[in-house]
Image (spheres, rainbow, N blue to C red):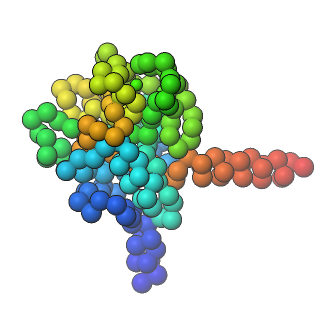
């Protein structure tokens, strides 16, 4: 019974959008968990951001996924992207939101891009050919192209509050908690040496 309760505590909880289809979070190469959420009726980046921030897993709060290096990009392509069925849009494939955005006033189309939860700049990028292009005017949010010929996992800029897409990727825990843990571990290491 105690084991069952423990396992129930690790089940992901998403408070918004009961129509979504949640895959189980999977541990990535950087020690964070990533979860694919498919939303057949589609949602905007702002809606995905709110849903990811309301999701919890094992007591950890989620945020839209952030990708700092190639190993996480490779992991998402091999382990997370295959978990979306794209059943609502098989003819054209489907795309998912991740946590990058471009603050107002940034040089277009490529300037100023940040990760939303951590505030870190996009150093590693995986833009699709010709992207970012700001083509719809105010394409200031980041998405991954999941199924579209050979474009699996490439990045594209789209508007934040329109042009809804078929899903989003959550990361657990949110980066501010990771930072606190890292500072705590570093503090312990220093304290032990003293
Ligand atoms: Ca833009
Ligand atoms: Ca674009």
Residue 37: x and y, percent? 30, 51
Q: Residue at x 18, y 26 (%)?
A: 149
**Residue 19 point in image, percent of width and height:** 23, 60
Relative placement, left or right, of 100 versus 81 is: right
- Total marks drawn? 0
The residue that appears at 65% across and 52% down in the rendered structure is: 181
The residue furthest top is: 130
Q: Tell me which residue sits at (34%, 33%) in the image.
A: 159
Q: Residue at x 29, y 59 (%)?
A: 17
Residue 48 x, y percent position in the rendering: 36, 48
Farthest residue, direction left: 91
Q: Is residue 6 above or below residue 30?
A: below
Q: Nearer the viewer, residue 141 or 81?
A: 141
Residue 27: in sight, yes or no? no
Nearest the viewer among 147 and 14 is 14
Quadrant where the N terminus is found in the figure: bottom left
Q: Residue furthest right?
A: 194
Q: Is residue 142 left or right of residue 189?
A: left
**Can residue 186 be seen from the camera position used here?**
yes
């Amino acid at each position: 019974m105690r084991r069952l309760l423990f396992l129930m505590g690790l089940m992901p909880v998403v408070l918004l959008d009961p129509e979504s289809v949640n895959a189980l979070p999977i541990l990535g190469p950087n020690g964070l968990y990533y979860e694919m959420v498919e939303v057949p009726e589609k949602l905007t980046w702002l809606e995905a951001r709110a849903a990811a921030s309301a999701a919890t897993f094992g007591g950890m709060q989620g945020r839209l996924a952030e990708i700092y290096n190639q190993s996480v990009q490779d992991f998402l392509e091999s382990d997370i992207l295959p978990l979306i069925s794209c059943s609502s849009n098989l003819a054209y494939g489907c795309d998912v939101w991740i946590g990058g955005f471009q603050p107002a006033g940034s040089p277009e189309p490529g300037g100023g891009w940040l990760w939303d939860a951590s505030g870190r700049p996009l150093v590693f990028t995986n833009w699709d050919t010709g992207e970012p292009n700001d083509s719809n005017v105010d394409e200031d949010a980041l998405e991954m192209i999941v199924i579209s010929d050979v474009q699996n996992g490439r990045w594209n800029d789209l508007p934040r509050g329109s042009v809804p897409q078929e899903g989003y990727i959550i990361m657990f825990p949110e980066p501010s908690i990771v930072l606190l843990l890292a500072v705590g571990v570093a503090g312990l290491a220093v304290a032990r040496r003293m």
